[in-house]
Image (cartoon, grey):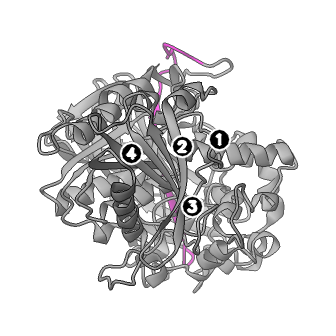
Amino acid sequence: MKKYMQFIFLLLMVFSFGQNKPDNTFIKENYTKKEVYIPMRDGVKLFTSIYIPKDISASHKLPFLMQRTCYSVAPYGPDAYRNGLGPNQYLMKDGYIFVYQDVRGRYMSEGVFTNMTPQVAHKTKKDVDESTDTYDTIEWLLKNIPNNNKKVGQYGTSYPGFYTAAGILSDHPALVASSPQAPISDFWNDDFLHNGKFMLGYFRTFPVFGIQKTKPEKEGWYMDTFIKPTSEDGLKFYREMGTLKDGYEKYYKNNFFMTEIMNHPNYDDYWQKRSILPHLKNVKHAVMTVGGWFDAEDLSGPLNIYKTIEKTSPKAKNTIVMGPFSHGAWARETGKAFHNDIYFGDSIATYYQKNLETKFFNHYLKGDTKSDAGIPEAVMFDTGSKEWREFAQYPPKNAQKVSFYLTDGTLKNKAENNFTEYYSDPNKPVLSSDNLKDFNGFTPRNYMSEDQRFAEGRPDVVTFTTDALTEDITFGGELMAKLNIASTSTDADFAVKLIDVYPEDFVPKEKKDGVIYGNYHQMVRSEIMPARFRNSREKPEALVPNQKTAVNFKLQDVMHTFKKGHKIQIQISSTWFPLFAVNPQKFMANPNFATEEDYTKAFIKIFGDSSLEVDVLK
């Protein structure tokens, strides 16, 4: 158990530390560390570590690069130095004043922690949120750290990415560059929920986010509440747990965040005020939002933040970067870049760090903030052709809407008057993976590009596949599932997977031992949608049994070339376990509290005028 908890703690630290090296000699020789409590406008004091280059002077003034985090600014103590500074090793050596801060209620800071702190739209002098805490921190730094050049940048990955996005709203004149990376934008569609559907694969994470500390803490006070794996077969835990209600009552009744999720099944005020998107208006400084196409935690956040700023803030220098990465993997160079079984190239993280991230911060924090950094509007990795592509706008100007209709087991260019039917039993759900060890993970990761052959052919999974392609086709932009369905029951989930089926004779440039790459069914994109929210997230509606009904929803964006000789496939099911909690398939006011007695079997039809609408690059 101790080793497992140490692993979890180290995993959390990755998102706070950025790219770490095992030796902190360089930092000790070149930086002076200060630890301070910075007072906020309401009197709460936030613990802050500041690393100041020793060569700073009146003739060599330097900018600030700041990260605010709920994952600890450890190590604590004026003589205890981090193993890495900043988002990458190049910036660490380029001369910045690095600032790390524990947010309210976390580790050594005062105050009370709340998940996705609601943004206060109309503030009085006493109102506080993450944007005011950012503003107050910047003010203190400018006044109390000598020889700064009066410019501040901020960055962060995952939850620190959200704090970066919220910090944009501080509107402090010294804040000239922000890089939210894998940021949460709206809890309804990031991390714990997808279109309001509870992501059961996150079940082990709740101690981190749902236990308040009672005193200053230098280590994780929640560590002894983690659920210890008891078997290499991680599926065993979820099967024995029972329903979501059973798991909540057994493990998390005293966890405030899990309780909030359980008690708010719809997009009510609790969730609405935790969306940062409505507040991202009139952004005036440079923003580079970063994400990974295989980020199982926060894929929608970077896409939605970029698109929102693009619509609302014409004065912002707005850039998006999307690479072939899992959550935060751009901060760690692995040499040969794989996601799960799939190889994407060499030194991809280094390319990003040197040519995009370092260039972005150096330009705006040390150069002319009024000029452009020379980074394209959108830098997107094509996960099919395995190359970086640059665009002057995103979605690309040359994208054309094309619909692939789901009919008779194939994908066609026109609708047909038929249907495909499957049988869905919540007691025997479709598995989300055949890698049983992965179910013991802290958060899901590999499923985003995993081989989907294990699901094809099940009676509760329907499949639609093209013939082998005669030429390359690139999906580059948004995806919309437009399903027309009918069920014999009153509720259902719809999990839609977009899959690249490799040729039988496919041989990859780089491969992993034991993987059969011929006929590999690589998942490219996927999403789930509860039918109850088809018309309104706020006011769910039951299905009328056997009545044809439209269920339309976005899959997250994609940049993927399906190569000549490959096939495009769509898989649809109504269970996806244990990645997502099982839908009882009976309409309930709060399905989070469904019991096994509520589980209802159903026959479900997908009509031939259903489609996947995609942006195809011409």
Q: Which residue is mark 3?
A: 574
Image label count: 4
Going from N to C along the chain, the mark reached first, 2 or 3, is: 2
Does 602 sit above or below residue 448? below
Going from N to C along the chain, the mark reached first, 4 or 2, is: 2
**Real-space Cα distance between discs 3 and 4?**
46 Å
Q: Is residue 432 visible?
A: yes
Assess whether mark 3 and mark 2 are in contact (beta carbons under 8 angstroms). no
| Label ID, residue 80 | 1
**Real-space Cα distance between discs 3 and 1?**
51 Å
Task: Please give left or right for residue 258 compared with residue 572 in the image.
Answer: right
Going from N to C along the chain, the mark reached first, 1 or 4, is: 4
| Label ID, residue 195 | none
Q: Quadrant of the C terminus?
A: top left
Assess whether mark 4 and mark 1 are in contact (beta carbons under 8 angstroms). no
Q: Main secondary structure of the magenta part?
A: loop
Determine the secondary structure under disc 2. strand
Identified by mark 1, the residue type is Ala
Q: Which residue is mark 4?
A: 65
Assess whether mark 1 and mark 2 are in contact (beta carbons under 8 angstroms). yes
**Real-space Cα distance between discs 1 and 4?**
20 Å
Identified by mark 2, the residue type is Lys
Of discs 3 and 4, which sits in the foreground? 4
Task: Please give left or right for residue 198 compared with residue 466 in the image.
Answer: right
Of discs 3 and 1, which sits in the foreground? 1
Task: Please give left or right for residue 543 compared with residue 22 in the image.
Answer: left
| Label ID, residue 33 | 2
Residue 508 belongs to the span the image colors magenta: yes
